[in-house]
Image (tube, helix red, strand yellow):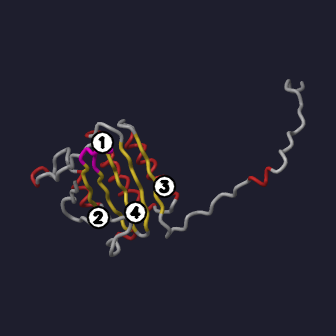
Amino acid sequence: MKNAEPEHEPTPEPPGLDEHFVPAPPLIPFTEPWEYELHFPRDPRGPAVARTTLKAVLGAHGLEEFTDRAELLTSELTTNAVRYSLGPATVRLRWTNPVLRVSVMDTCPVFPLPPAREEADAERGRGLLILDLLADAWGGCSLEESLFGVGGKTIWFDLVLGGGDPPPGGGADRGSGPRRPGPPVLAA
């Protein structure tokens, strides 16, 4: 039995198609800086999307060494953004060899306070303790409501390739400087 569709001649390529072909860009060298940003709504699925995106970016750039720590810390910060903020959040990954900086921005200007020593084994409120233990440096700032829209806060952490100290002067836009251990720097 013959196919029910009529046979067609192959469609010829339009003339001059090769003139408009743009070759793929070369891969960014390992030592060159890059940045990715993910915006997500206030939705309980947001932290899972952020973790999946983070793992994909780190894997694509050969930075698997960071995956476990970065995933746990990003999960902690994005979960808090969804839980305590009333608006969307943003996760930014920035690589400046040898430092990976992950920043989580949300619309809640209230900066978390470290738990008291006697609360260290509580079920909630341990995010800053986890940051102290796993990040090579961390910090953040709060922004009050401004003329340009809703305020909020940013909390960031740095992971250094090889687990060493960040280089003098910092890696990616060091912001308020390395903060390990201790409370974050607050800026109004």
Using the numbered discs, state the Cα–Cα distance from disc 1 to disc 4 in whole angstroms.
28 Å
Using the numbered discs, state the Cα–Cα distance from disc 3 to disc 1 in whole angstroms.
29 Å
Label 2 crowd bin: few (<14), some (14–19), many (20+), radius 10 Å: many
Q: Which residue lies furthest to the left in this view?
A: 118
Q: Is residue 167 magenta?
A: no
Residue 73 at x, y = what percent? 32, 53
Q: Residue at x 21, y 64 (%)?
A: 181
Out of 83 and 155, give the one closest to the viewer: 155
Vertical placement of residue 113 versus 31, above or below: above
- Toward which corner of the image does residue 47 lie, by quadrant? top left
Q: What residue is pinned by disc 4?
A: 100
Using the numbered discs, state the Cα–Cα distance from disc 3 to disc 4 in whole angstroms.
11 Å
Magenta highlight range: 144-153
Q: What residue is pinned by disc 1?
A: 150
Q: Residue at x 38, y 68 (%)?
A: 171
What type is the residue that disc 3 sits on?
Answer: Val
